[in-house]
């Protein structure tokens, strides 16, 4: 009898394991009916083991995906109070009650949530519930998002104004500005709303408000100056000059005059009216000296001379500046600029001496400054021009050791090697199912974190380990971010990767050594099919799109920059609208930029347009980040293509180009 009993238990154990395995396979394929059936079979085979392994929770998640809210609520309510998953189960049961419009049950479950339960999950319930129940949640949550939603429900314009005055850069501010604008009466409110619109590049809405506020003497200078800024950002430089001249005239002797006169010089620079720009910068430097933005004005004046081909004037201006007291960073900028000019004049020995001098300095990142590897690369170029081939190759061999860096790739080219991957054309191999293979390898690596099937609940269990066992990667990735969770970087990166939270995978993987197994975590090929489809439609290499997304947003679809760029590929509204028109998307809205498919479609189209227009990945990347007009400005300083990246005038844009090239090389190394 004992043997028969043992065999009977073993048989049922095997059947239970088989049902559970089928459930996990179905879950991975999002086959909810098959997952439901397999889990129901497992429960009938061994209810105790089913409960001990939190499969009621998993069954509830499956019911949610089937929109079977009655069953979902029943399953989540079976999770005991001493179970580590209980708080999450209460939240899910609350969500089910909201969907079933069972307000009494929802109220009880809301009160059962722990006080420190994540606000973003409470907000999700509120958005799904709406009405008085949502208002009750918003009153308990102190975030700006909750306060805005509460103000909307109560039509509380005072709270909208308060939100604007606290912060004008986030999406809450933009929505508050849109809602509050019809109620604006006072000039202070006009300025607040206008500044919020301007911060989000909603210039058509900002401009009339600035103009109206300028009628009040207390706000006239600021409002008129901001009007000039709007025209500048709209690239209407003649109108900007008119406004700035009026500000300089009407507010003589103030900082407004000084700043307006600097902006006038920049407007002429942007208009390619270099002689007027030269005169304006010279006058500014003479008039304000160190009291103004003298160093930046001098750097711009040098660039004007370079564009005009007046390199001797440029060098003389730099030499005068170098004889004055300069900050260490600006001294490096001027030395680097002088070395580039000498190099372009074929004065390679003099250029080399300065490049070597810079190589001995502690170089700092700034607009117009150089990196150490950049200086070393130009040392190699100068040595080669002087006929010192061995010295040049020593420099390039050293740089080429870093196969992912931009100048490492350039140095490899000088040594007769190709850069990692092709820089133009398409790469269909990048669209092979490598992402699914990586996911399988990552899941196998996490197998050691999953506890075995158990007969009873473990007292040492915690919420993350239970979610990992259930392969609920989305919730596990969320919960490892909570205070008290102590997950080593590698499994944390892997959990985030499997959850599709690629920005967090990158965050954790950045703490790990770069190896063959960690590169896909640091450079995840997220949204792969969408990217491949868009790349194929636009005839561009999808690896470039991966690299751009990596640098722009780290695959966070909700990313937003201080310059009002949004989504995976970080479009500002006016660029998005322009590209959308050519891509057959006339009804684009700002909110749509957060949609991954929309962002990728726009990004592929824009990247294709830039490559076609500029015929250079370096220039196309600089245009993507800094704008096509600025690319024309930077490349006009020298006819030597070797100098383009070094001549990028924005520190952010230069770093962007270097970083995207590095990311692209990393992706190309394993997307084969």
Image (cartoon, rainbow, N blue to C red):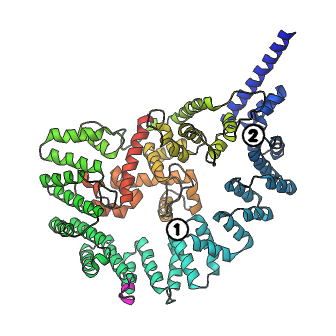
Q: Quadrant of residue 421?
A: top left
Question: Which quadrant holds residue 493?
Answer: top right
Pointer 1 residue: 200
Residue 440, by quadrant, is top right
Point 52% across, 48% down: residue: 555
What residue range appears in magenta? 247-254
- Give the x, y percent position of residue 264: 34, 78
Residue tagged 2: 62
**Left or right of 648 on screen, residue 221:** right
- Vertical placement of 327 versus 115: above or below? below
Residue 528: percent from left, percent from top = 53, 42
Q: Residue at x 65, y 42 (%)?
A: 476
Q: Is residue 327 visible?
A: yes
Q: Is residue 160 above or below residue 36?
A: below
Q: Secondary structure at mark 2?
A: helix
Q: Is residue 589 visible?
A: no
Spot occupied by residue 386 in the image (x, y as percentages of width and height): 12, 47
């Amino acid at each position: 009898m004992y043997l028969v009993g043992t065999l009977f238990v073993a048989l049922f154990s095997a059947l239970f394991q088989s049902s559970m395995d089928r459930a996990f396979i179905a879950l991975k394929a999002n086959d909810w009916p098959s997952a439901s059936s397999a889990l129901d079979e497992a429960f009938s085979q061994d209810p105790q083991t089913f409960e001990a392994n939190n499969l009621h929770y998993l069954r509830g998640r499956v019911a949610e995906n089937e929109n079977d809210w009655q069953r979902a609520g029943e399953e989540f309510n079976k999770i005991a109070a001493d179970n580590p998953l209980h708080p999450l189960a209460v939240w899910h049961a609350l969500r089910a009650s909201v969907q079933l419009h069972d307000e009494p049950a929802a109220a009880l479950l809301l009160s059962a949530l722990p006080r420190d339960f994540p606000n973003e999950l409470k907000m999700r319930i509120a958005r799904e519930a709406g009405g008085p129940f949502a208002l009750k949640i918003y009153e308990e949550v102190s975030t700006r998002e909750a306060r805005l939603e509460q103000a909307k429900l109560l039509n509380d314009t005072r709270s909208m104004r308060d939100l604007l005055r606290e912060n004008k850069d986030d999406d809450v501010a933009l929505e508050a500005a849109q809602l509050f604008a019809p109620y604006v009466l006072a000039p202070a409110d006009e300025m607040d709303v206008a500044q919020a619109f301007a911060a989000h590049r909603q210039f058509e809405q900002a401009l009339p408000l600035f103009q109206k506020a300028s009628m009040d003497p207390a706000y006239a200078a600021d409002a008129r100056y901001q009007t000039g800024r709007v025209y500048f950002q709209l690239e209407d430089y003649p109108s900007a000059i008119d406004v700035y001249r009026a500000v300089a005239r009407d507010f003589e002797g103030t900082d407004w005059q000084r700043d307006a006169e600097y902006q006038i010089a920049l407007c002429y620079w942007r208009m390619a009216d270099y002689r007027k720009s030269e005169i304006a910068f010279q006058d500014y430097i003479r008039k304000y000296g160190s009291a103004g933005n003298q160093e930046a004005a001098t750097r711009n004046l040098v660039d004007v001379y370079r564009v005009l081909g007046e390199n001797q004037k440029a060098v003389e201006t730099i030499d005068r500046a170098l004889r004055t007291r300069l900050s260490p960073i600006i001294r490096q900028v001027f030395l680097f600029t002088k070395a580039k000019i000498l190099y372009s004049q074929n004065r390679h020995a003099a250029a080399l001496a300065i490049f070597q001098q810079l190589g001995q300095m502690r170089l700092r990142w700034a607009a117009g400054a150089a990196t150490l590897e950049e200086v070393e690369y130009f040392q190699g170029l100068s040595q080669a021009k002087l006929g010192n081939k061995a010295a040049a190759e020593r420099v390039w061999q050293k740089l080429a050791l870093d196969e992912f860096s931009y100048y490492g790739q350039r140095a490899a080219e000088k040594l007769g090697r190709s850069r990692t991957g092709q820089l133009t054309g398409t790469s269909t191999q990048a669209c092979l199912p490598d992402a699914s293979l990586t996911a399988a390898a990552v899941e196998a690596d996490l197998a050691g974190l999953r506890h075995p099937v158990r007969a009873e609940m473990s007292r040492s269990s915690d919420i993350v380990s239970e979610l990992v066992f259930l392969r609920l990667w989305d919730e596990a990735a969320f919960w490892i971010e909570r205070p008290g969770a102590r997950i080593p970087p590698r499994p944390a990166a892997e959990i985030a990767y499997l959850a599709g939270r690629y920005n967090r995978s990158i965050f954790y993987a950045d703490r790990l050594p770069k190896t063959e197994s960690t590169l896909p975590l640091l450079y995840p090929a997220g949204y792969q099919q969408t990217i491949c489809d868009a790349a194929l439609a636009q005839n561009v290499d999808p690896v470039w799109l991966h690299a751009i997304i990596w640098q722009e947003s780290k695959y966070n679809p909700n990313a937003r920059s201080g310059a009002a760029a949004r989504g995976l590929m970080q479009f500002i509204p006016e660029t998005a609208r322009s590209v959308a028109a050519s891509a057959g998307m006339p009804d684009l809205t700002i909110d749509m930029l957060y949609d991954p498919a929309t962002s990728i479609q726009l990004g592929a189209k824009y990247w294709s347009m830039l490559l076609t227009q500029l015929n250079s990945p370096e220039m196309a990347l600089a245009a993507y980040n800094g704008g096509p007009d600025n690319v024309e400005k930077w490349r006009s300083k020298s006819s030597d293509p070797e100098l383009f990246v070094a001549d990028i005038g924005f520190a952010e844009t230069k770093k962007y180009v270097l970083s995207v090239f590095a990311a692209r090389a990393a992706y190309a190394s394993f997307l084969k």
